[in-house]
Image (spheres, rainbow, N blue to C red):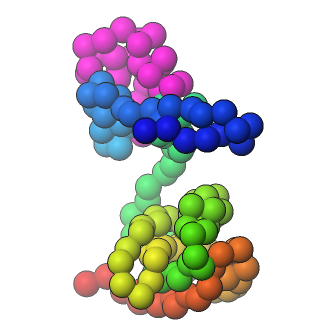
Amino acid sequence: MSKTSAGGTTVAKYTPDDLDRQIIAHLRADGRASLSKLSDALGVARGTVQNRLDRLLETGTLLGFTVRVREDYDVNTVHAVMMIEVVGKSTTQVIRRLRGMPEIYTLHTTNGNWDLVANIRAANLSEFDRILREVRMVDGVANSETSLLLSSV
């Protein structure tokens, strides 16, 4: 599978192998794992892990590293689910824009009346209002419906 870069050249899409998937699995469990810890756990050289991480980042397979916190860490955080309808064939461009918004915690394609489902986390209602406006202003977003998540049961 390949894609066309901004310069018009065709670039092969990188497909992670078993070692890459093992590195990703370890980082999901411990995002702060050192190269030495990863190399020991996987039985490969530290340089191999470094090269693989560099490639995973360069190809966009890994988008970055983040912090996970307890659900009750910040009681003022606003959690919501937004269903998004996309116009025509602009889904790829819309996804690219939405993935760049840090308040969109996860983004999924779906079937039915909506094209995308976004899980949103905002620091407060004012920030939540801002992100709703930003999403609705993205070229290609035709319609949206948002539900606040009140409590986990």
**Horizontal and vertical percent position of residue 34:** 43, 25
Give the residue drawn at x 35%, y 43%.
28
For the question of whether residue 152 can be seen, the reply is: yes
Against 114, is 93 above or below?
Answer: above
Q: How many labels does the image show?
A: 0
Q: In which quarter of the image is residue 4?
A: top right
Residue 141 vs 56, above or below: the answer is below
Residue 26 appears in the rendering: no
Q: Residue at x 74, y 37 (%)?
A: 7
- The residue that appears at 51% across and 49% down in the rendered structure is 66
Residue 35 at x, y = what percent?
A: 43, 20
Q: Report which quarter residue 114 is drawn in.
A: bottom left
**Relative to residue 60, is residue 93 depicted above or below?**
below
Q: Is residue 48 magenta?
A: yes
Question: Percent from the top left, x then y, of residue 9?
Answer: 66, 33
The one nearer the camera, 81 or 124, is 81
* Residue 149 falls left or right of residue 121: left
Query: Secondary structure of the magenta portion, mostly?
Result: helix
Q: Which of 124 and 59 is in front in this view?
A: 59
Question: The N terminus lies in which quarter of the figure?
Answer: top left
Residue 123 magenta-drawn?
Answer: no
The C terminus sits in image quarter? bottom left
Q: Is residue 110 left or right of residue 83?
A: left
Q: Where is residue 43 in the image (x, y as percent from the top left)?
A: 25, 13
Front residue of 36/11: it is 11
Q: Is residue 143 above or below residue 11?
A: below
Residue drawn at 60 percent across, 79 percent down: 87
Residues in magenta, as a range: 30-55
**Left or right of 140, for residue 110:** left
Query: In the depicted view, which residue is nearer to us: 123 or 52?
Result: 52
